[in-house]
Image (cartoon, rainbow, N blue to C red):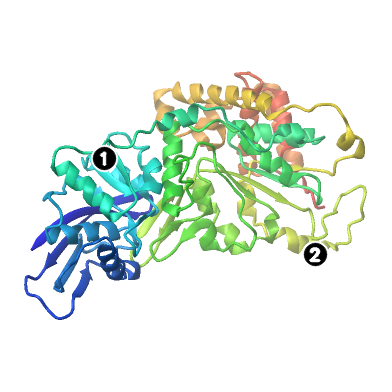
C-alpha cells in the first residue's frame, strides 16, 4: 500500500518541496520494522520512535508490518524534526485512517511529541513561500509557527496543536467542510508606531559623535568610534537603530526568513518589524559570526541583514574572525561552502564598531595618564587589519564627557527629530538613483544608499566645485590619504549634502567629511 504526503526542507533561506512516500507490506510480522531512506540525518532517522509513540498515544493501532519511508528527491540531504508530521499522516493514510486520499494540495510540517502534540520548527516562512511558488494552496503548520507562515499571501495556513487535530482537518476537507484558515494582516504591524527602548534624548554631550551617527544612518555608512572606557560608545551605538529608516515590507519579509531559518523569530509577532540590532560578544567564533554547520545556517552577519551589527571592543575579537567580515561588507552576501553543498545568505548591514585607543584605554585622555608603551599600543591596534578599516567610512573620537555636560539640565535633541532628517536624506538618495541616466542606471539599480555607490556613481553624483576640489586635494597631500579614502570622503560628503538639502557637494560638506577620517590623521602618533 502506497500513500504520499508533501513537506519541505530548508536550505539557506529557501525551501524545497519534499515528497514523503509511505509504503507498507500487507504481510504481518512479529515485530514492526521502520526504515527511512532519502539521505535522512540523525534527527530524521530518530523520527520513527517519535512517530510510532505519537500515533499510539493518539488512539490509533498500527499492526506490526514492514514500513518504508522515502523522502524524495533522494539526492538532497534531509535534516531536522519537521518531517515527523507528514510521516505520521502518511502512515495513517496508508493504513486507511484518513478519508482523504490525495494530499497533493497540502503541505505539512511539524515535530511530534510522544503524546501526539505538534511542536514548532524553524523555517516556516520560507516553507510558506515555497508552497505558494509551487501552487500548493493549503499549509498545515504548528500553532507557534502560524503567524510567520501567514505573512505569505495566497496560501491557506492552518495552525494545529496535535496529530488528531490534523486528521480532523484533513477529513473535514475531504467531506467539503474545511475550517477557515488563519487570518493575519502583516502589513498592519509595519504601520504601527515604532517604539524604541533607547533614545538620543538620554545622551548628554557628545555632539560630534551624535552628528557622525546621523550622517552614518543617512548614508548607510559603517562607523568606528574610538574613545576611553565610559565615554558612551556603547550607549550611542544602542541608540543608532532609533534613527534608521523603517523597514519596508519586502525588507521585513527577507529579514524574517533569515530569523525563521535560524530559529530566533518571535512566534508571537510573526514578522520582524524593526531593523535588527545584533551585538555579539568578542569571544564569538568565525562560524558564529559568518554562519556554518554541516548544513550551513546563518550567522550574526546575516541576522543583521537590513539592520545593524555592533562590535564592541573591536580589537578583542580574534583577527581571523574579523577578517571574515570583508566579503559581506564588500558584497552584501555570505557564501558558505561545505562538502555537501554551498549556500549563500544575504548580509547587507551597517557596521558600527567601538574600541579603546590602547590596552589601558586612556591614550590621549586629558584626565588620566596612559600606562601603555608604544609597542603595546601598536600590537593592540594591529589586531584590526588595514583592509577592514578601509571598509569603514567614518571613524571618530568619542572623548570622555565633561562633568558640566553630564549634569547639564538642557534637553538634548531626540531620536524623532534626527530620524526625520535621515528620512529626508534617504528620500533624496532614492530619487537620485531612480532618476539616473540609462548608462548609469544599470549599475545603480541595486544601490539603496550613498555608501553603496561604485566609482561610476561617485563621479556622476559627487562632482565638486573648484574650492571644494582644492580643499580635498590639500587634504590628500597633507594627510597622505589613499585613493580608497578619497572615495570614502566623497561618499560621506554626498550624504552630508543630502542632509543639508543641497544638490551640490560644497566646501563645508567636504571639510566635515575629512574630519571623519580620524585614523587617516595618524591618531596614535
Say if residue 445 shows up in the picture: no
Q: Nearer the viewer, residue 73 or 220?
A: 73
The spot of residue 292 in percent (x, y) is: 45, 61
- Compared with residue 486, is residue 142 higher up or lower down, i.e. above or below? below
* Disc ID at residue 132: 1
At which x and y percent is residue 192? 52, 27
- Which of the two residues, 491 or 308, is positioned nearer the viewer here? 308
Res. 25 mark: none
Residue bearing the label numbered 2: 376
Rendered view: 521 above or below 42: above
Q: Residue at x 18, y 59 (%)?
A: 92
Name the residue rendered at 53%, 53% in the picture. 300
Asked whether the viewer can see residue 466, the reply is yes
Mark 2 vs mark 1, CA separation in Å: 58 Å
* Element marked by disc 2: helix
- Classify the position of the N terminus by image quarter: bottom left
Q: Residues within 10 Å of mark 2 (few under 14, many from 20)?
A: few
Amino acid at each position: 500500500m502506497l500513500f504520499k504526503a508533501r513537506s519541505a526542507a530548508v536550505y539557506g533561506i529557501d525551501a524545497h518541496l519534499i515528497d514523503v512516500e509511505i509504503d507498507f507490506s500487507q504481510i504481518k510480522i512479529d515485530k514492526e520494522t521502520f526504515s527511512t531512506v532519502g539521505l535522512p540525518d540523525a534527527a530524521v532517522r530518530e523520527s520513527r520512535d517519535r512517530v510510532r509513540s505519537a500515533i499510539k498515544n493518539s488512539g490509533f493501532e498500527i499492526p506490526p508490518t514492514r514500513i518504508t519511508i522515502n523522502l524524495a528527491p533522494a539526492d538532497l540531504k534531509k535534516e531536522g524534526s519537521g518531517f515527523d508530521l507528514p510521516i505520521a499522516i502518511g502512515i495513517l493514510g496508508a493504513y486507511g485512517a484518513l478519508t482523504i486520499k490525495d494530499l497533493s494540495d497540502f503541505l505539512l510540517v511539524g515535530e511530534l511529541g510522544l503524546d501526539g502534540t505538534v511542536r514548532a520548527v524553524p523555517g516556516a516562512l520560507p516553507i510558506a513561500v515555497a508552497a505558494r511558488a509551487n501552487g500548493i494552496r493549503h499549509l498545515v503548520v504548528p500553532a507557534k509557527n502560524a503567524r510567520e507562515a501567514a505573512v505569505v499571501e495566497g496560501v491557506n495556513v492552518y495552525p494545529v496543536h496535535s496529530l488528531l487535530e490534523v486528521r480532523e482537518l484533513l477529513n473535514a476537507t475531504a467531506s467539503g467542510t474545511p475550517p477557515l484558515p488563519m487570518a493575519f494582516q502583516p502589513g498592519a504591524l509595519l504601520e504601527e508606531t515604532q517604539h524604541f527602548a533607547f533614545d538620543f534624548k538620554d545622551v548628554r554631550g557628545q555632539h560630534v559623535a551624535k552628528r557622525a551617527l546621523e550622517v552614518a544612518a543617512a548614508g548607510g555608512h559603517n562607523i568606528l568610534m574610538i574613545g576611553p572606557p565610559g565615554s558612551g560608545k556603547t550607549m550611542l551605538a544602542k541608540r543608532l537603530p532609533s534613527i534608521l529608516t523603517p523597514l519596508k515590507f519586502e525588507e521585513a519579509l527577507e529579514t524574517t526568513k533569515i530569523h525563521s531559518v535560524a530559529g530566533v523569530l518571535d512566534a508571537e509577532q510573526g514578522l520582524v518589524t524593526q531593523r535588527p540590532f545584533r551585538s555579539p560578544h568578542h569571544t564569538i567564533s568565525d562560524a558564529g559570526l559568518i554562519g556554518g554547520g554541516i548544513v550551513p545556517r546563518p550567522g550574526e552577519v546575516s541576522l543583521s541583514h537590513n539592520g545593524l551589527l555592533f562590535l564592541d571592543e573591536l580589537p578583542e575579537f580574534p583577527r581571523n574572525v574579523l577578517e571574515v567580515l570583508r566579503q559581506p561588507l564588500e558584497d552584501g552576501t555570505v557564501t558558505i561552502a561545505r562538502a555537501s553543498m554551498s549556500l549563500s545568505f544575504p548580509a547587507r548591514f551597517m557596521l558600527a564598531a567601538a574600541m579603546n585607543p590602547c590596552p589601558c584605554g586612556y591614550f590621549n585622555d586629558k584626565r588620566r595618564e596612559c600606562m601603555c608603551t608604544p609597542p603595546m599600543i601598536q600590537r593592540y591596534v594591529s589586531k584590526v587589519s588595514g583592509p577592514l578599516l578601509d571598509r569603514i567610512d567614518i571613524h571618530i573620537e568619542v572623548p570622555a564627557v565633561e562633568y558640566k555636560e553630564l549634569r547639564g539640565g538642557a534637553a538634548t535633541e531626540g531620536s524623532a527629530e534626527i530620524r526625520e532628517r535621515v528620512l529626508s536624506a534617504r528620500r533624496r538618495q532614492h530619487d537620485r538613483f531612480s532618476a539616473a541616466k540609462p548608462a548609469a542606471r544599470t549599475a545603480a539599480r541595486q544601490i539603496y544608499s550613498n555608501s553603496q555607490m561604485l566609482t561610476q556613481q561617485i563621479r556622476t553624483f559627487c562632482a565638486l566645485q573648484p574650492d571644494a576640489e582644492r580643499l580635498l586635494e590639500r587634504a590628500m597631500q597633507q594627510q597622505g590619504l589613499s585613493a580608497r579614502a578619497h572615495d570614502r570622503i566623497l561618499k560621506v560628503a554626498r550624504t552630508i549634502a543630502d542632509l543639508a538639502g543641497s544638490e551640490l557637494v560644497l566646501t563645508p560638506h567636504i571639510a566635515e567629511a575629512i574630519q571623519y577620517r580620524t585614523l587617516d590623521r595618524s591618531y596614535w602618533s
